[in-house]
Image (tube, grey):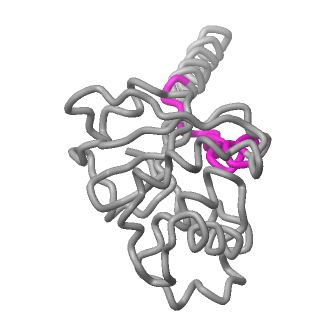
Amino acid sequence: MKFLSPNEAIRGCEDSRYLDQEENDCVVRAMALAFGFSYDEAHGFTRGIFKRQDGEVAYNFTRCMKTVIQDSQTFFEGSIKQFKVKKGLCAGQMQKLYPNNTFLVGIEGHVSIYCCGTWIDYEDLVFRDSVIEELYIIENAAHLDELKGKLVRPEKFWSDPWLYAVVIGTLLLLYFLDKTYF
C-alpha cells in the first residue's frame, strides 16, 4: 500500500499551535484533508461539529458525519456522501477497487483519507487487513486537484526495465554493426 504523510498534505500543519499537543487527532487530519481546511481550521470544525475536545478521540464520528453530510454545502464546495461498504472490505483492497476515488474512511477506532490509490496517513495506523467500517466519497471539490498533485511523484528516469532493454539492445546492435565494417 502507498502512503503519504498527512503533514505533507495539510495546509498549515507545520505552523499549528496544536500540532505538538495532539495524539488522537486522526479526525482533525481527516477533516482537513476531506474539506481543504488548514490544520487549525479543522480543529475548530471538529470542536464544533464533533464536540471533540483537544487531544480526545471523536467518539461520535458516525452520528456527526450525518450532520456533516446534511450541512456540507454551507462550508464545502463539492460533495460528500456515504458510500456503501462491501462486507469484509479491507484497506489493502481499496487500490484495486477504487484507484481513482477519494474517500473519508472509518476504520475501527481510526479515521483516514484514501485518495487515488494512496493512504494519506501514517503507515503504522492503516494496515492491509484493516477492516473498513465506513466510507464517504468526496467528489467535485477544488482542493482535491491540489491534493492529488501531491500524490503524483515523477518516475525516476531509469526505473523502467524496458528502458534498460532498449539501451542495452541499441548498444549491442552498434557493437555488432561496428565489427562488421572493420
- With respect to residue 23, does 41 lie above or below? above
> What is the x, y in percent for residue 177?
63, 11
- With respect to residue 127, does 83 lie above or below? above
The residue that appears at 46% across and 49% down in the rendered structure is 119
The picture quadrant where one finds residue 72 is: top right
The residue that appears at 38% across and 49% down in the rendered structure is 106
- Queried whether the magenta region covers residue 180, the answer comes back as no
The picture quadrant where one finds residue 69 is: top right
> What is the x, y in percent for residue 130?
24, 48
- With respect to residue 87, does 75 lie above or below? below
Q: Main secondary structure of the magenta part?
A: helix
Looking at the rendering, in which quadrant would you find the C terminus? top right
> What is the x, y in percent for residue 159?
54, 38
Left or right position of 160 against 135: right
- With respect to residue 121, does 150 lie above or below? above
Taking depth in this image into account, of 103 and 156 the one nearest to the observer is 103
- Queried whether the magenta region covers residue 145, the answer comes back as yes
The residue that appears at 51% across and 90% down in the rendered structure is 21
Start and end of the magenta stretch? Answer: 144-162
Left or right position of 37 against 102: right
Taking depth in this image into account, of 172 and 124 the one nearest to the observer is 124
The residue that appears at 49% across and 37% down in the rendered structure is 117
> What is the x, y in percent for residue 147?
69, 48
Looking at the rendering, in which quadrant would you find the N terminus? top left
The picture quadrant where one finds residue 93 is: top left
Left or right position of 1 against 156: left
